[in-house]
Structure formats: structure tokens, C-alpha cells
Amino acid sequence: MVFVSDSFVFVFLPLFLIAYASVPAFLRNSTILFFSLVFYGWWRFDFLPLLVAIACWSWLTGLWIAKASGPERRWALLAGIVPPLVSLICFKYVNLIVESVSSLGAPVKDWSSIPLPIGLSFFVFGAISYSVDVFRKTVYAEPSLINYSTYQAMFGHLVAGPVVRYQSVAERLKSRVFDSAEFAEGLRRFMLGFAQKVLIGDTLAPLVDAGYALPAPSTCDAIVTVTAYTLHLYFDFAGYSSMAIGLGLMVGLKFPENFDNPYLSTSLADFWRRWHISLSSWLRDYLYIPLGGNRAGSFRSYFNLMVTMALGGLWHGASWTFMIWGIWHGIGLIAGRAWNAMRMPPVPAPVGHVVTLVFVMTGWTLFRAQDWQTAAIMFSGLAGQHGLAMSNGFAAALRPIEVVTLFVGIAMVYLPALNKSSPWLAPVIARPPFALATILWLWSLWVMQSRTVIPFLYFQF
Amino acid sequence: MIKILTVLAIIFAGFVSVVVRGGDSLYEILRTAPLKDYLSGSLSGRVDRAVFDAIPRGAGLNGFSAGLLYKGLRDAGPQVWAGCNDWLYSAEELRVDRRDAENMAARIRMLPHLVQAFAERKILLVVVPVPDKAEQVEAQLCGIAADPSRVRANAWAQAAGATKLHQVNLRDQWPRPGYWRTDTHWDSTGAQFAAEATAKLVNGVLGAGTERVSLTRGARHERPGDLARLAGLQDAPKWLAPAAEYTEAARASIQRSGGLLDDAAAPSVLLAGSSFSQNSDFIEYLQAALAREVAQVSEAGGGFAGALLKMLQQKPDMLAGAKVVIWEWSMRSLVAPLSDAERQMLRQTEGH
């Protein structure tokens, strides 16, 4: 099920709210869990046992890690991490491995692709972080299977994040009271996210598809397409994250913020502090630092950074293009770090912003391409190999509403920068009021009725 | 608290609407679905559709917004290109896709096999490619050119030249405009021209027809265009919508000579086309021009060879007694993704 659908807004959500409000406090987590399983099963029920198994396994090993001592703790930790990781590799990367082996001249006979359970990457990351945190003693092992499973499976973040760590919801899972102000805030965040996704993200989707389908895009075609994708990806994903955070708040659970105006960044490191924050901080804490982080000299830290970004890229999808995208960002981050290490003069903020944005957008070009050929065509377009002016085929695909949405999207990206210079506008930009959120949500509901459901981009991850 | 209740009231109003308006169909879907549909998730699509249908929509409001977009921004939705002077075009004719060349090449490879299949049955296959509206009424496109249409037409002309075809060339002498303003299909003038050109070729091979066919015209009435519908403009207020179009239906009456018991033989001419063959009374004009009865086996949405392949692969009995099959298809369908039937034919003929 997707949030942006009639089934969710007008059936699932009201039924859930009725059930949640009707049950006594000790059954609230069970209610969330039950509805989360239905939410997931809406896509495919036959993958539910996998999720349940990972949750149960992770919960059991968490208890083991907490009880064990000496070398046994490490074995318990391995037991907590390895099976979920193996399931992720099996479902997500085996197809890629088989295809790669086949393309190298050793075809695997009678191989049929394994479907990827949606949200598996988020689910497994949640399980790994829990095991590691229990091992590090930063959280207590959760004694209740229901509470732990509720954390893992809560429908708000189940299929597309943010990557929620157990410690951020542990207290609230044990006890929470209804707070109307928090519920209102959750509703406001949900409605704003809904509007972001429908009015901007989804409106730009057909333009991106048309641009990437061109056989010979001109420079103008490629720039407009990449700009549209840059906005589409942000508003789609940030919108979804906002909806997830809002749904969490409505039931008293606080999920981490996932975006902080990433396209206003003035350096690549700054970008990664603002983009998909829950993932980048997860990679930092559970991959980069365990690899050694910055502690073993600059060359080792560059290596660690590169490994983290390459694996982080591959996490986004089972395609080598994702890994190269990760490596591209790894190179950028290393270059930024080397610049600072060599005590070079600081880059002026506007220059840094432009360079960062161009770098990120170049990366998105690769990120969106399904294969090398598509990426090569788009890069050749950006390089001007098919002329500069907008091509007739692209002009035919460019709808006026998409042009308007492009400009609105760009304005939305830069509006927060006006925060300081425009005091009267600042509060509205920083925190759009409930009434505005309601109007935008109603508008997006109306727009949604005229469209077929467009699945959320991050489902594939 | 009031603001929360307002939003919840909207959500619960939608819920009540789903229960009241869609409860029965939802229950029926859930009751009759086999277990495998629950497991595989294929059920959810049907439930989503039923829920979507149960939500009340103000057609007037949707029409108003579509009209505002159309008049204000000249935006007619993702499937329709809004040209000048209320001329609408199917976006399919204007878009360019990387797979176009591949799809076109596949169909061109299919062509000799199709021709051979009919030649083996001693049936004359008459090919009637319908030119793109964008190419023939290019002046009203407003800001863009019909380049993709020309690419398709030229590629086809080259391929057709290499295969011995009985083809009707509509493109060169097309009676412009020949298309409805708000519809993707030919208008009465275009349909009549196409019918007469086709009949000229058929009669040239078979000899003139002998049946007496008279053509009568009905009363003039408004004709809503499919492109206006696709753009959501059918419910727009008149001042926001493209100007209405009118037509007079044509009707062909055939006086059969009759057999021993005044029975008539099955028509020896079959029309296996696309929605063009079902629009603007093309078949009526065709029967009149041929002086022969024509059996309609066209399929709306059949694309390049939908109706033709259906006859060949699923209903070959229909071809018994046929002397001529008129195969009409729109030039834009050359680049559409291949249908299952087309893939199957390619697999059979090319052995992969």
C-alpha cells in the first residue's frame, strides 16, 4: 500500500485510527503491529513470513547479546547481524551477481529473477542497528516481542524509511499518552508531505520519464530532465519521509528527521549531513566508524570513506550504476577533505553551493539511469553531442504545468534561504501553518483523483 | 482541536463514502478472490480500483480545473498536445522514445510474413496506413513540428517499397485538414477520401462491385472528441473548453441481389483495422465506394496489426471465403510497444 492512495487515506487510516483509539493502552502496540502487517501484506502477503522471521530473530538475538558475556557476546552479535544481512544479499543482490556472471560469459541456466521484498533494506538496517546498539550497550534489549516488532514493522517507516533506530523510539514504545498537539503536528507533517509528493514530485515524473526516453537529448533537454529529476527525487522522498514522520507522531512515536534543505548545501559533506540523514548517519555509525573512521590516518580514512559510499550506493539498488554513483560521491567527499587537509583557502559559499549542486546533479544523472547505455546517452546530451537547443521531441513532452512546477520546485528549494532576510516570511517557510497544510493536502487529494497511483520511488530500495 | 476534527471529518467522510458506495463491490471482490490472489498481492489492485471508484468526484469541478489549465496554460494533460485554435493532438504522435526504432524495425520485419500468410490463402491484403494528424495538420501544432511523424512515414515508405504490397497512399493527396479538431481520428472528409482511395485500389484488382449501395445522411449532431475527453475537457464549462464539433452520421444501405432463397453470401471483403475504421463512418463510405458489402472486424486499440493477427491466430475461419482483407492502421502505431500477439508472431517467424 502507498500513502498516496485512496485506499490508504480513506480506508486504512480511518480504520487504524478507530482501532487505535478504541483499544486500551496495553494493546496499542499490538494494534500498530497488526495494521503494519496488513499494510505490508497489501503488496504481497507471501513475503510477510520473511519480515516476521527477521523481526523475531533480531529480537531473540538481542536478548542473547544482552545476556551473554565474554567472547559469546561477539558470537551473539554475529548471529544477530549475519542472517538479516544474508537475506538482504539473497533477495537484493543475487540477481545482480547472476546477471554479472552471465554477462562475463558464464550464463546461469534456468535462472529466474528473485523479486525484492519492498522495504527489506530498511528493515534489515533496523535489525542490524538494534543488534549493534545492544552489543554496545547503548540500548537495553527489548523484553517484549510485540514492542520490538512494532518498532521494526511500524507502517509509517516500514517500506521506505526513514531508517529508524530502536533507541529513538524505545521509551515511547513502552509508554506514551495521547497528546493532541503532537497529533496535530503529525497530521500537519503528513499533509505537507502528501502535498509535496503529489503536487511537485509526481507532477514532474512524466517529464523525467520522457527526457530519459529520448534517443538523442540535446544539452537543453538533458539539463531540464536532470533538473526535473533532482526536484522529483527530493520532493518525492522528502514528502514520503514527512508523511512517515507525521504518522509516527500521530501515534506518539518520534522518527528522526530525514532532510534538512539538502539543495542549499555549500559542500558535499554538508549535502550528506542534510540528505537522507537517517541513512548517512546509519552508515557513519555502523560502517564508517567500525571500519576505523578517521582514526588511522588520512589515507585509511579516505579508504573507509570510499568503501562506505560505494556500499551505501549499492544499498540503493542492485545495479552497478548505483555503486558507481556511490563511488562518485566518495571521490567528491575525499576531494573536499583533501582540500581542507591541504589548508587551501575556504571556498566562498555561493561557489561551493553551485559546485555542490552540479556535482550532485551529475550524480543523479547516473542514479536515475537504469543501465549504462541510458547513462551514456544522458551524459552525451549534457556534453552537447546532440545540439544545444531544446529538441522537438522533448518540447512535445514538456507540459506547461510541468514548467510551472519546475519553477515552483526551485522556489521551494531556495525559499528557506530567505529565512533570515525576510522575518515576516520566516515562520511560514520554516513551519507552514496547519491551515495551509490542509489546503495543500485537499488540493493534492483533488489532483490525485485525476491520476492513477504512481508508486513511490524509494520502494525499489 | 477544531482543525484536527476538520481533517478527520474529511478522512472519515471518505471512509463512509467507500463503505456506502463501494461496500458491496469490495465485499464481492474479497469474497470471490482465490487465496493465491491474496498472497501474491494481485487482489490489492482490484480493491484499490473499487475504493477509487467509490470516492465521489465532482465532474464539474474536475472539468473546471481541466478547463482552467487548458485555457490558462494551454495544457491538456499528459496524453494530449494542445495546439492553436482548439486543435488537439494525441501526444503519442509527437513523443520520441529510444525504443521507437526498435519497435518499428520489428514490425517491418513482420510485414513480409503477414503478406505471405494472406498470399498463401489467396487473399488480397490491402494495406491502408493512416497518416498522423500531426503531420497533416502541422500548421496548428503551435511551436513544435511533426518530425517524428515524418520519420515514421519515411521509414515505412522505404520498407513498403522493399516488399511487394498493395498499399493505399493516403499521405500525398490527403484532403487537409481531414481530421476532427478535438479527436484523434479522421473526420467525414478524411474517412470518405480514405474509403474512395481504398476502393479504387480494390476495384482495380477485383473489378467493380455489383451491389447497389446507397448512402444516406442523418441529422446533424454534436460530436464530443476523444482527445477532449482524454484531456478531461468534456465536463469543462463551454467558455473553458474547445469549441464543439458537429457531424452528420452516414448510413450505407445495401440492396443484395439474393440467392435461391434470397439469402446473401458472406461478404468477401473484410475490414481489419483500428479505431479509425470504426470512426466517422469509414466502413459506410467504403461499402458505397466499393459497391460491395464489407465485414467489420476492426478493433479499437488494436494498434498496428491487432485485428489482423487476431483473425490469423485465433479466428482463421473468418477468412474462409474472403477475397480481400483491408488492413488499416495508424502510422503512429508503428512505434508503439509490441503487443503479445506481435511478439508471438515474431517468435514464430524468427524462431526466438
Image: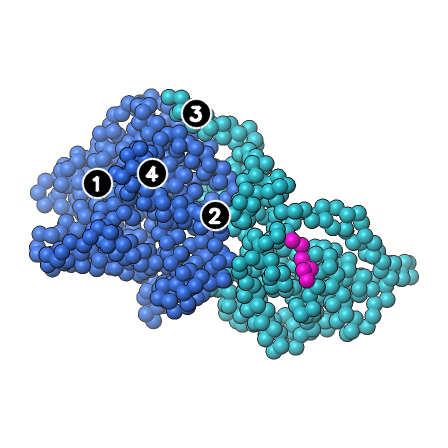
Determine crowd level at label 4: few under 14, some 14-19, many 20+ residues with C-alpha closer than 10 A. many
Look at the numbered disc 2 and give the secondary structure of its residue: helix
In three-dimensional space, the C-alpha distance between marks 2 and 4, rounded to whole angstroms, equals: 24 Å
Q: Residue furthest right?
A: B260
Please state, as top left, top right, bottom left or bottom right, where the N terminus of chain A lies in the image.
top left
Residue in view at x 67 percent, y 54 percent? B180
Residue in view at x 51 percent, y 58 percent? A396
Badge number at residue B109: none
The chain letter under disc 2 is A
Indicate the amino acid at tag 3: Thr
In three-dimensional space, the C-alpha distance between marks 4 and 1, rounded to whole angstroms, equals: 23 Å
In three-dimensional space, the C-alpha distance between marks 2 and 1, rounded to whole angstroms, equals: 45 Å
Indicate the amino acid at tag 1: Tyr
Magenta region: B176-181
Tags 3 and 4 touching, CB below 8 Å: no
Observer-nearest residue: B24 or A210?
A210
Residue B49 percent coordinates (x, y): 52, 40
Q: What colour scheme does the image use?
A: by chain
Observer-nearest residue: B207 or A414?
A414
Badge number at residue A401: 2
Does residue B76 sit above or below B155 in this rendering? above
Q: Is circle 1 on the same chain as circle 3? A: no
Q: Is circle 4 on the same chain as circle 1? A: yes
Q: Which chain is blue?
A: A
Q: Is circle 3 on the same chain as circle 4? A: no
Q: Which chain is cyan?
A: B
Observer-side mark, 2 or 1, equals 2
Return the residue at label 4.
A242
Look at the numbered disc 3 and give the secondary structure of its residue: helix
